[in-house]
Amino acid sequence: MLISSAFGAEWMEHHAPKMDLMDKLTVLADSAKYDAACTSSGADRPGKTVLAGCCHSFSADGRCISLLKVLMTNYCIYDCKYCINRVSNDHERTTFTPSELAELTIEFYRRNYIEGLFLSSGILKSPDYTMELMINALELLRYKHRFQGYIHAKMIPGASPDHVRRIGFLADRLSVNIELPSEDSLKLLAPNKEKRAILAPMKQVCMEETQNTRELAVYRHAPKFAPAGQATQMIVGASPESDYQIIKLASAMYSKYSLKRVFYSAYIPAAKHALLPALDTKPPLLREHRLYQADWLMRQYGFDAEEILSPETPNFNPYLDPKCNWAINNMHLFPVDVNSAPLKELLRVPGIGPTSARRIIIARRNSKLNISELKRMGVVFKRAQYFITATDWILTARMNKEITVKALIDPKAFSFGMEQLSFFQDTGGIQKLSAQSGINSITKAIEETVLCLTSNL
């Protein structure tokens, strides 16, 4: 049932500053840029028709799609220390009416600027009031304008189950941000939010998806509830949790709530506070990169969080990606024979991904595989050669440790900059290396890094 598009207009008339639609779009798109659930946002590139609010995400079938990424409002009654839209921040504020947002989205869609909408919001008056605004905007899009594009909607923690259910039948994907990896950090930095209020809609969405699957099995024309599933986001670097704590939490949410994705957002200092990193602190982009790599290992390669990190080694090695780091520290499990190893073992080999592993399983049914055939299948032999045997490649002796580490070292670690290493706990020479200012050559830096790593293995 459609409610009046004037919902919320009375509040805006008395409280919100007068602003034309494009100015509102600029303000609310800028306020949405810190949400990491889209690939990019606000990038100024040649040929881009609309700067404000355009971003990219990936659909369930792998297509890259353009989305209008905005907030319903950047007013907020909460005072989360890390958030630019917190109530205590002196910030330009505005709010879309449901009809404004619906008309803006459909006009952009008709002009082929976008293929969908990413809608989040600050909290105006109360979680239920804000969700009602968002639902009304999506109802106008779906029912009045017959919009069939992709919609990703953020749920507001604390909103009623009825609002969660209603928005689930309007959006393709739902998400609620868990924000911080521990309840202690949430209490310190976001005192108005409760862990149970964040997890409640996650649990409900999981239950609604299960129920909807049963309904569709009986009534195939039944409406679909959030067909693209649900996701969440964690801020990395605003609080002191280790990488091990973060991926353990992500692994638990994948199994318990059937999440499609966990997004990791490197904290960008936007507020001065004693509990937060200083404003001149660089975002931990390398750490974010490693978290995404570890997340991919859990979702696509069958790794457990405890295999990637442990309480004894709670943080990532910045110079080796998580899979290579695991392989180097488990050399007793290698080499594996590509002509007989099961899929699980093939997926543990650096240089062999899910696609090439499946190709190996199929191809070896007909003949023994050699190196040239492996390369044609997409195996990165530069990495895999230290961990496999094939018909024309036999490791008769253990490879030199330094050679192996040098082949696996990640050059991206140096492109992110040495300041990214502050989270890495090491008792050896790596911290000394990061403190040196005289290393100008990447080659020299790699050589010294190899020596540090091999001495600690």
Image (cartoon, helix red, strand yellow):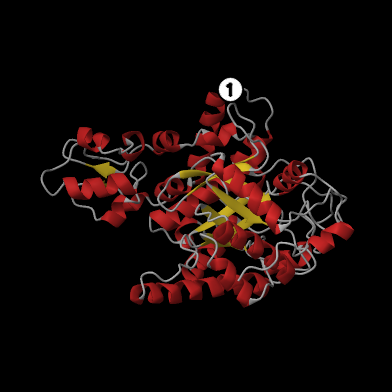
In this view, the residue farthest toward the left is 366
- Residue at the image position 47 percent from the left and 36 percent from the top: 409
Q: Position of residue 319 (x, y in %)?
A: 53, 40
Residue 136 pos. (x, y %): 65, 64
Q: Is residue 450 above or below residue 313?
A: above
Counting labels gives 1
Q: Residue furthest top?
A: 441
Q: Residues within 10 Å of mark 1 (few under 14, many from 20)?
A: few
Q: Is the residue 241 above or below the residue 57 in the image?
A: below
In this view, 110 is above or below 5: above
Q: Quadrant of the N terminus?
A: bottom right
- Res 244 visible: no
Q: Which residue is located at x 26 percent, y 49 percent?
A: 358
Question: Quick one: 48 or 297, which is closer to the camera?
Answer: 48
Query: What type is the residue that disc 1 sits on?
Result: Ser
| 5 up-or-down from 71: above or below | below
Residue sitting at 80 percent across and 52 percent down?
A: 94
Q: Quadrant of residue 243?
A: bottom right
Q: Position of residue 225 (x, y in %)?
A: 49, 68
- Please state which of residues 356 and 177 is positioned toward the viewer in this rendering: 177
Quarter of the image where one finds residue 421: top right
Left or right of residue 276, residue 421 in this image:
left
Front residue of this view, candidates 401 and 209? 209
Residue position marked by numbered label 1 in the rendering: 441
Q: Would residue 13 be visible to someone looking at this image?
A: yes
* Front in this rendered view, residue 94 or 389: 94
The x and y percentages for residue 93 are 82, 51
Label 1: element kind = loop
Does residue 418 appear to the left or right of 129 in the view shown? left
